[in-house]
Image: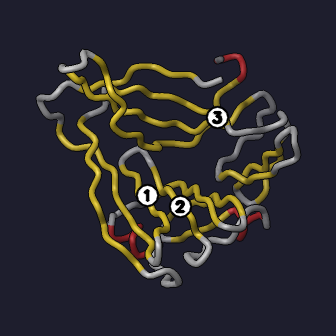
Amino acid sequence: MTGFKLVRPAGKLVIQNLGKHKPGVDFIPAIIEDNKINKAVLHGIADDGLIWGLWSEAKLTTSWEATGIGARLRTQTLQSLRIFNQDIELRIWRNVGWIEICKAVEVEQSEESQLIIQEDYPLFSNGTSKVRNGYTILESRSGEIQAAPIITREVHCTPRLLIYQYFGWQSENLCWKLNHTRWVDLSYRHEEDR
């Protein structure tokens, strides 16, 4: 079950294309530094599994490096990657022959009508977790394992992915239309807060 609420962030979401790169070139740290990101969470899908990571103090650490769980971050096998924090989201995905990148940031609010819904999604877990090298190891009831870059020693907490959904008003149809989403944060919510 997800939880959601209406929010009013500072501005309108703008998506900016940052270009293409050839697979095999390790450009990810440079892209993060070019966008002046100090700390961010990484979540990706590769041909060989799930990738979680943390960018902090100009250093990238993945769940594979810290715990041995998940896939290695390699542009040759990368399908998609999101690098996100409260201020920015970088989206990286593989296309035919290229790796493409775009940036999602909020800018000053425009005059157009906009509605933002904040929603948090639980990460799968059977209710037990272990902490290893700054990552929480989560196992689903079906046996899938992932290591998210978040630490808690509390037992009755659920790791949550916070997402903003941006809706624009369509006056011709008299309805709100989902225009974009932006991943914002990774945190915990206590079970009694549900």
Q: Splitting the image into 4 quarters, where does residue 78 fall?
A: bottom right
Quadrant location, the N terminus: top right
Mark nearer the N terminus (3 vs 1): 1
Give the class, few, some or many, for how many residues have Cα within 10 Å of label 2's Cα (few <14, many ≥20): many
Tell us which disc is closer to us: 3 or 2.
2
Whether label 1 touches label 2, CB < 8 Å: yes
The residue to which callout 3 is attached is 188
75 or 35, which lies in front? 75
Residue displayed at 50% across by 80% down: 23
Q: Residue 169, percent across and down? A: 24, 23
Q: Residue 5, percent across and down? A: 45, 19
Q: Say which element carries label 2.
A: strand
Q: Is residue 186 above or below residue 89?
A: above
Q: Splitting the image into 4 quarters, where does residue 54 fall?
A: bottom right
Cα gap from disc 3 to disc 1, whole angstroms: 23 Å
Quadrant location, the C terminus: top right
Give amino acid for label 1. Arg
Give amino acid for label 3. Tyr
Q: Say which element carries label 3.
A: strand
Q: Say which element carries label 1.
A: strand
Residue displayed at 77% across by 34% down: 154
Tell us which disc is closer to us: 3 or 1.
1
Cα gap from disc 1 to disc 2, whole angstroms: 7 Å
Q: Residue 3, percent across and down? A: 56, 22
The residue to which callout 2 is attached is 80
**Is residue 97 left or right of 34 when viewed as pictured?**
right
Residue found at the very far left of the displayed protein: 111
Q: Which mark is residue 91?
A: 1
Mark nearer the N terminus (3 vs 2): 2
Q: Is residue 183 above or below residue 61?
A: above
Give amino acid for label 2. Ser
